[in-house]
Amino acid sequence: MRHWHARIRTFVARGGPRVPNLVRMSTALLTDHYELTMLRAALKSGAAHRRATFEVFARSLPAGRRYGVVAGTGRLLAALADFRFGPEELSLLTGSGVVDAATADWLAAYRFSGAIRGFAEGEPFLPGTPVLVVEGPFAECVLLETLTLSVLNHDSAIAAAGARMVQAAGSRPLIEMGSRRTHEEAAVAAARAAYLVGFAATSNLEAARRWGVPSSGTAAHAFTLAHPTEQEAFEAQVDTLGVDTTLLVDTYDTEAGIAAAVAAAGPGLGAIRIDSGDPAAGVRAARAQLDALGATETRIIVTGDLDEHSIARLAGVPAAGYGVGTSLVTGSGAPTAGFVYKLVEIDGRPVAKTSVGKTTRGGRKDVLRRHDAGGVAVVDLVLPAGERPGGDAASRGHSQTEGGLAPSALDGPAEQAQPVGGSLAGPGRDRPLLVELVRDGAVVDPTVTGPVGLRRARDHHRAALADLPRRARDVAFGHPCLPVITSVPHP
Amino acid sequence: MRHWHARIRTFVARGGPRVPNLVRMSTALLTDHYELTMLRAALKSGAAHRRATFEVFARSLPAGRRYGVVAGTGRLLAALADFRFGPEELSLLTGSGVVDAATADWLAAYRFSGAIRGFAEGEPFLPGTPVLVVEGPFAECVLLETLTLSVLNHDSAIAAAGARMVQAAGSRPLIEMGSRRTHEEAAVAAARAAYLVGFAATSNLEAARRWGVPSSGTAAHAFTLAHPTEQEAFEAQVDTLGVDTTLLVDTYDTEAGIAAAVAAAGPGLGAIRIDSGDPAAGVRAARAQLDALGATETRIIVTGDLDEHSIARLAGVPAAGYGVGTSLVTGSGAPTAGFVYKLVEIDGRPVAKTSVGKTTRGGRKDVLRRHDAGGVAVVDLVLPAGERPGGDAASRGHSQTEGGLAPSALDGPAEQAQPVGGSLAGPGRDRPLLVELVRDGAVVDPTVTGPVGLRRARDHHRAALADLPRRARDVAFGHPCLPVITSVPHP
């Protein structure tokens, strides 16, 4: 057998990065080599110009999760605008033989001219439903696979984990502080995704700059260690940041630290932070000590390896808020959302894979979320595009339940929508989940790519989550909170 | 109790990003808010100017791992050069009240002037050993915590997972193809880290451009679906990429796909790729079918949810190479390396936390890797900086074993260094692991920040891994492969 390694088709950039840490002018190379080779072959075969529909969907949720959250849409639409092949990109691609001259000419003029529909950013989703639909000439759409999936898979994984933490924390605010545990740019996106699902603030300054996320922070253990005594460190911090600051009291001994904190700031101290030890016991002891010192209004912030489960267990102790790092930015056990990008229609013909374990469902589709008389979501309906559902969707010939329980098996009676939830659909209504994002290559609402869109997505997430059945908000291991009924024939 | 949320110190950027998807001029805001507040307070208290030593280390390895791999050093040193506070950063920080005017003046002149020592990029490490040491005025060093940890935690997590996959694959090449499963910039870094530890190529074009990593790719299922028949798709691909291409044969039925592939390309077809089903059975069946069709030299590439364990199980089947995605870019269950950045010395005084479960060991340190008479590493020694070890390091008064087994409990006899390993130290020698990276604020060897440095790090990794005991290269669950003996007194 010949040695395969030496024959890999490779592309090695000559001379390396001119600006290593990077002034990025284009997002076009944040993609996989094979998209360019497919393009090249499709231009030659003619497939490039066929009208294509690609869908993004997840085959399943991470084990035990009740719903996923679509996140990253605003970032994706911003990146789409920068998806251009300039002279530098083209010279790399042609110089290395990835593309030929004809393909390079086509790429030089590339501008996505098609349409994108998708779930609103922040929308909860169930497996098997298309959350993004990209339509246009095959060649234009096939190039967007990697960028689309990178953004959505990362941001949605963080958002899904963060949403559960927000539910677990109830009315107590959460600060995202996981930047140091993930790639430095992923950290900015993670801070954005956490804010999307209801975190109050982030430690990440670039997320504040770029996305308007409120940022927050006071001091680390190093600040205490850099001063001769803990109390001198606290005095220095109070001197600069005021008595309303948060003092980190567990560098040495937490009880002594709390005493030093109140000594330095007085009983009007804003907050203390505890970053180690058993949090429940630590908070109770700290509360008693603070109260005994007269610092009855001093809040207790808990940080240190928290996740949605440990936050839920702290509901009964007098913590005022939480900082979450590692578990948030790593998706709490599910660091990627599992979205795939699949061709479902070509020139009006539904197409689908039949690979073992990886089948797809062909054809353009719509998705509706159906609500009961109380305004609570009961099922997601996946229909051929343009078809209207009957009330009998569940009994149609091609029906099939995926990724959830059949309605008859729902694990509880119909629930009231939360009174403050502001139902997005209303009693007995079907809400279309795919909304128009890009038309003729242009972003329909350019504000979605900036801080304004992020704040609107945050509001949408809160409202949409309030419309889900109550079991959705339980962080314990469980089934997807809604059934999905797909009424699309196999081609 | 007052409502804590409303009183978080926040910083909201006004007006949002001017260039949403971004021309980044500075890495200075890829950091945590609290570093700026600590700086501000330390400038006022005087702590800012004290001589500080910070160490980066991991308290433990992910469960079952034999070693970690230091990765990201080249990226970090490149990012350090861009860690500057320009007018835009300063106006954001002052406008939001994060820093005052005096702090802003200090930041405007900021340039790291200190020293950085660290493990060579690609070096295997054990828990408890400092892998990076940052020294300089407290204020200069404290600002680098988040950027340092973000880069090292991400890249080292990928490298550690990837190194095990390379060991499991033996002489068969691996292609990194996980870009779509992680943040789009993390994808570039992941491709770099995979190449560092011995992957042959990546699917990521930006990693090819920026770091000179060979890129590779041919076609996805969508390409097949976009053509009227599978064979027409294969013919189109062969027409463009030649018979030496790799045809993806499992869009519909793999047996029919292989037949169509050989029909389209002839028996000289370069390779097929199988992305679904049971890989062992699929490869065996495909090999038999290819051989029967006369395509005896056609290679079989396996992709689809592989990790180090499934790759190891494929050793006995005639696969020619593997593509790895999700498990690589998510660190195969450990998406962050667990590095922390801790102050260990201030103005010559060793300092250490005594927090429950999070203690540190004060004082500047050196790290030596000791080798036996066969050139095989036997122990990592952590010593006070400047001290030389005796042969009796294990019996010193302050000795302590951390993160591994004591030498007497090693799970096998002394092993020979691999004959092709090219021992870095030599029989019976101690190799210092901390090398000088930055002196007086300047990168000692600027090539480490580019493709040349990456290739050198790749070579170093291979040689350093070859010097470890053979058990290090076992991907089964096990103990750290070397003991760490720390001969540093508690302060």
Image (cartoon, coloured by chain):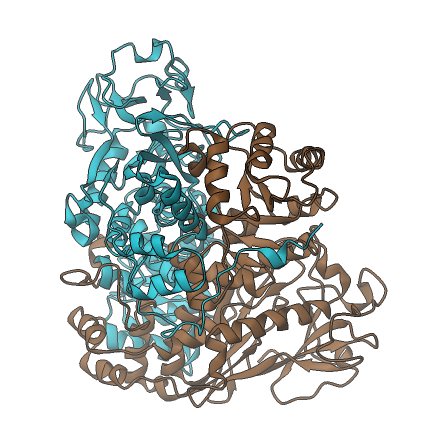
Chain colours: A cyan, B brown
Q: Classify the position of the C terminus of chain B by image quarter.
A: bottom right
Is residue A216 shown to the viewer in this render?
Answer: no
**Quarter assignment of residue B35:** bottom left
> How many numbered circles does the render carry?
0
Q: Between residues B375 and A242, which one lies in front from this camera angle?
A: B375
User: Does B274 appear above or below B195?
Assistant: above
Residue B66 position in % (x across, y down): 67, 59
Above/below status of A352 relative to A334: above
User: Does residue B330 appear in the picture of this structure?
Assistant: yes
**Residue A109 shown left or right of residue B461 in the figure:** left
Instruction: Determine whether A435 is above or below B2 in the image.
Output: above
* Quarter-of-image position of residue A46: top left
Residue B298 position, x and y percent, is 65, 44
Residue B27: horizontal and vertical position, in percent?
33, 71
Residue at x-position 37% and y-position 79%: B81
- x and y percent of residue B93 in the render? 21, 72
Left or right: residue A263 versus residue B174 is left
**In the picture provided, is B10 more to the left or to the right than B418?**
left
Seen at 69% across and 37% down, the residue is B294
Residue lying farthest to the right in this orientation:
B413
Q: Left or right: A432 with respect to B320?
A: left
